[in-house]
Amino acid sequence: MQTSDPVTRADGAQLLARIRTWATELGFSRLGVADVELDADAAHLRAWLADGRHGDMEWMARHGELRERPEALRPGTLRVLSVRMDYATSATADDWAALADGQRAYVARYARGRDYHKLMRTRLQKLAERIGAEVGPFGHRVFVDSAPVLERALARNAGLGWIGKHTCLIDPQNGSWFFLGEIYIDLPLPLDAPASEHCGTCTRCIEVCPTQAITAPYQLDARRCIAYLTIEHEGAIPEDLRAPIGNRVFGCDDCQLACPWNKFAKMASQPDFRARNRLDAASLVELFAWTEEEFLQRTEGSAIRRLGHERWLRNIAVGLGNAPGTPAIIAALQSRAEHPSALVREHVAWALARHGSRITSTHNFMPMRDFTSTRDFTSTRDQ
């Protein structure tokens, strides 16, 4: 079969069956096929951006046409292969217990192991090579959070799940603990039926959100989202949102932990997603003690690395401010009271004040302000 010839219905169905088999062999839990029509989702995104709900993520407002029209991002695109890969490695009860223990640090499930981007991109490229070996040269491009892609809308259209009220993708047979990736292709493969919604009257995700970032069903205000505040936001965390953050030092899973569909979630088979450096059990004090060198060494190959040591300390200082005021907690905060970074010092000062402790630093603490600098990166919460 050559790409210069039309893919007939029978040929396309047979090829797609083989592609699904290859995807499973490469560790993907499911593969679906979507078309390139995204007008309704693009309109929703434009309204979300117009309301300013993207916060500092100015890159989300750029490249609108590329995000809305897959064929503009990769000319000739006719279909999108959407895949998912499971990443859950812990029990829901264990995560709730960690969140209830104010002295422990909570890191979002997806970030406890090795960064998924390179692993999934490599496997998607292998899948593309398998397809090429079967059909000959064909136009394609692989994406894993690497370009302006409406990945959840495409995954829904490919039948992988529906977009829930918390804006994450949900599969009725597998919950929501999975990563997404795409291959844009110029082969007219048969389309899968889009997934239908099954949230019903459930509002658990809305009710459980610590910062009330889910302002209405299917409406997320990133400016209040803990994932945004602890990962994407580069400046000082707004004071009124610090206490609700609790001990969440990198991301937040509450809305997914509360989702009843996740009782069907499957544990990850990929060993790279297992927690490293005790990120599923470490205390706030333990992580706050990491030097910059230790941080860089321990987060090598991790999604946490892009946060940088400064914001890592910022986040943990907030967690320490919300923790029980034990001597160990106070001592840890005092140890960073004269940190070179004004951002870190300000959050440490806030945390010490929460515990009624005196600040021993001789620095003049700067008032809370936005330390944001413009940079371009892609988000694991791209919607």
Image (cartoon, rainbow, N blue to C red):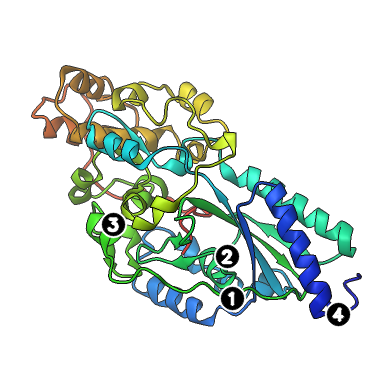
Q: Position of residue 181 (x, y in %)?
A: 61, 57
Q: Nearer the viewer, mark 4 or mark 2?
A: 4
Q: Amino acid at mark 2?
A: Val
Q: Using the image, determine if residue 6 lies above or below residue 92.
A: below
Q: Amino acid at mark 4?
A: Pro
Where disc 3 sits, the SS reads helix
Q: Position of residue 177 (x, y in %)?
A: 47, 50
The residue most toward the left is 356
Closer to the N terminus: mark 3 or mark 2? 2
Location of the N terminus by quadrant is bottom right
- Report the front residue among 26 and 324: 26
Q: Using the image, determine if residue 358 lies above or below residue 70.
A: above
Closer to the N terminus: mark 4 or mark 2? 4
**What residue is rendered at 36% in x and 45% in y?**
230
* Tag shown at residue 193: 1
Seen in the image, is 311 located left or right of residue 88?
A: left
Marks 3 and 1 in Cβ contact (< 8 Å): no
Where disc 1 sits, the SS reads loop
Residue at which label 4 appears = 6
Closer to the N terminus: mark 4 or mark 1? 4
